[in-house]
Amino acid sequence: MTQTLESEVSLMCNLSKGAEEKGIQKGIDKGITAMILTLKELQISSDVILKQICEKFGLTEETAETYLKEIT
């Protein structure tokens, strides 16, 4: 394999990995949003929702609060 071809293959792999990671994060975001909406429909308090999404998704409290604020 030529140096140019190796470089292009490496670039394609990196782009593919970036797209995969972006897709995974998008799925996680949708899951967190769905969980928040479901718990709100069940009239669960915001404090409990924060605790649950921190535990289930391994989020910091700041990050969890950001998700919760985006939904409300």
Image: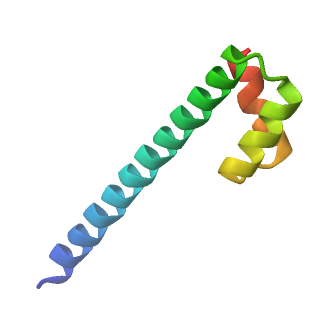
Query: Residue at (52%, 32%) from the top-left corner?
Result: 30
Query: Residue at (84%, 23%) from the top-left corner?
Result: 45
Which residue in the rendered view is the most extreme toward the left?
A: 1
Please determine whether, in this image, residue 36 is positioned above or below residue 3: above
Please determine whether, in this image, residue 3 is positioned above or below residue 51: below
Which residue in the rendered view is the most extreme toward the front?
A: 42
Which residue in the rendered view is the most extreme toward the bottom?
A: 1
Could you say which is closer to the camera, residue 49 or residue 29? 49
Please determine whether, in this image, residue 66 is positioned above or below residue 9: above
Quarter of the figure that contains the C terminus: top right
Which of the 4 image quadrants contains residue 10?
A: bottom left
Residue 22 on image: x %, y %? 45, 46
Query: Residue at (36%, 63%) from the top-left corner?
Result: 14
Which of the 4 image quadrants contains residue 51?
A: top right
Please determine whether, in this image, residue 7 is positioned above or below residue 44: below
Could you say which is closer to the camera, residue 35 or residue 67? 35
Q: What colour scheme has been applied to the protein in the rendered image? A: rainbow
Query: Residue at (68%, 49%) from the top-left corner?
Result: 56
Residue 42 on image: x %, y %? 70, 18
**Total count of labels:** 0
Quarter of the figure that contains the N terminus: bottom left
Which of the 4 image quadrants contains residue 65?
A: top right
Residue 9 on image: x %, y %? 22, 70
Residue 31 on image: x %, y %? 54, 36
Could you say which is closer to the camera, residue 6 or residue 38? 38
Task: Locate residue 5 relative to residue 11 in the image: left or right.
Answer: left
Task: Locate residue 13 relative to residue 5 in the image: left or right.
Answer: right
